[in-house]
Amino acid sequence: MKNNNHLATKILIGLAVGIVAAVATLIAGAWWPDVLTVMRRVSTAVFDPVGQVFLRMLFFVVIPLVFTSLASGVAQLGRLDRLGPLAGRTFLLFFLNMAIATAIGLVAMNTIQPGHHLDPEAKAQLMTEFGGNADKAIAREQAQPTPGLGMLVDMFMPKNLFGAFVGFSRDSLGEVLPLILFAILVGAAGTQLGEERRAKLLGGLDMVTEIMTRIVGFALRIAPYAVPAMIYSVIVKVGIDVLIALAVFVAVVGVCLMLHLFGTMSLWLRFLARRNPLTFFRQIRPVLITAFSTSSSSASLPASLQSANEELKLSPSTSGFVLPLGATMNMSGTALYEGCVVLFVAQAFGVDLSLTQQCMLMFLSVLSAVAVAGIPGGSLPLIAGLLVTFGVPPGGIAIIFGADRILDMLRTTTNVGSDMVTATVVDAQVRRG
């Protein structure tokens, strides 16, 4: 516990140093533009690679860790009939978590209407600066298959399982949904083995999990240096001017995300899990910092599992089942963000969405959030698809690109924190009944 808190403190200090240095660079760049130009090049050449070493060490262990922890969690149930109640509680809480978060975001956006406050010149600047990235996101969305039962089957059950989760390129994390289904099937089959053989299976899975966790420990040793490098690079490249143009939107979404994480989730902890929220969030502080700094639910999974088992003392079968699923499917922060972006861009372009359309938007935000890859920027192609669905110019997604990286950190923190709360609630319910 002391080591985790010490690490979290060092990461927070590094984060503050990175932010202060970036702001100082931007101020100096306002007087001497060459300084900003040089530091942007340095960020690309030096700071980005340092951050990528940290991120990719975490990505290395995602696939084996998801498989072993989920398969072990199911196999530890002992009897297959226990999987039904556990899965039922988990998926119900996932849906409620995302629906409540999206509703909070939509109510706030309708009340404050930040899209109407965006200056036309700022909008034109943002469209010009980030239009190329928007086109890429739209192209990725158009490459997706048409939604339907066939797409659902293809998402979870590809013909080539290993090809799906290995990925099609060196830059691809691979698909996690098919791996999740396969891990559940392996764990379910493991419950049918004799006691001795099931113990051997669990021993092998737990050994791999422990090895992956130790690799995560190696990565966390460089986190206090990688985190300031990443945040410095983001702020120096994005710039303050663009963020100011989006200040109201960023503030609304940020407040909504924190309200859901520390408000709604505190109520869940108090009344559903009977835990003290202040103690709980203090215990998972290193996990939240990891989520914020990496902007990746998948990269945060190793820290989540470690905290659930060592700090929160959750049942390994519950944490091993809920958290890997949550890292892929329980995206409350992403669902909230998607709904807010669609309304924001619609307001900026003068497109009014009726109450019925907004109810549909809430439902679609929840569904699309489930399909988001647990990596930085994974939601952008799906947001482009939602804009098209509601008759909003998809190129308008460029408006939010300037602030997306900052908000990506906040929504990932909400995603991961909600996963930890959900696992805690499920564990408490399983123990009681």
Image (cartoon, rainbow, N blue to C red):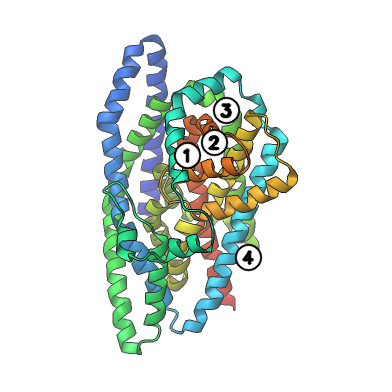
Name which quarter of the figure residue 109 lies in: top right
Left or right: residue 347 compared with residue 46: right
Give the numbered dot on residue 272: 4
Q: Earlier in the sequence, mark 1 or mark 2?
A: 1
Q: Nearer the viewer, residue 422 or 118?
A: 118
Q: CA distance from mark 3 to mark 2?
A: 22 Å
Residue marked by disc 2:
394
Q: CA distance from mark 1 to mark 2?
A: 7 Å
* Image vertical order of residue 50 relative to residue 96, above or below: above
Residue marked by disc 3:
247
Viewer-nearest of labels 1 and 3?
1
Q: CA distance from mark 2 to mark 4?
A: 40 Å
User: Looking at numbered disc 3 in the image, what kind of residue is underneath it?
Assistant: Ala
* Image vertical order of residue 122 relative to residue 106, above or below: above
Please report contact status of discs 1 and 2: CB closer than 8 Å, yes or no: yes
Please report contact status of discs 3 and 2: CB closer than 8 Å, yes or no: no
Q: CA distance from mark 1 to mark 4?
A: 41 Å
Crowd class of label 3 (few under 14; some 14 to 19; many from 20; radius 10 Å): some
User: Looking at numbered disc 1 in the image, what kind of residue is underneath it?
Assistant: Ile
Give the numbered dot on residue 138: 1
Viewer-nearest of labels 4 and 3?
3
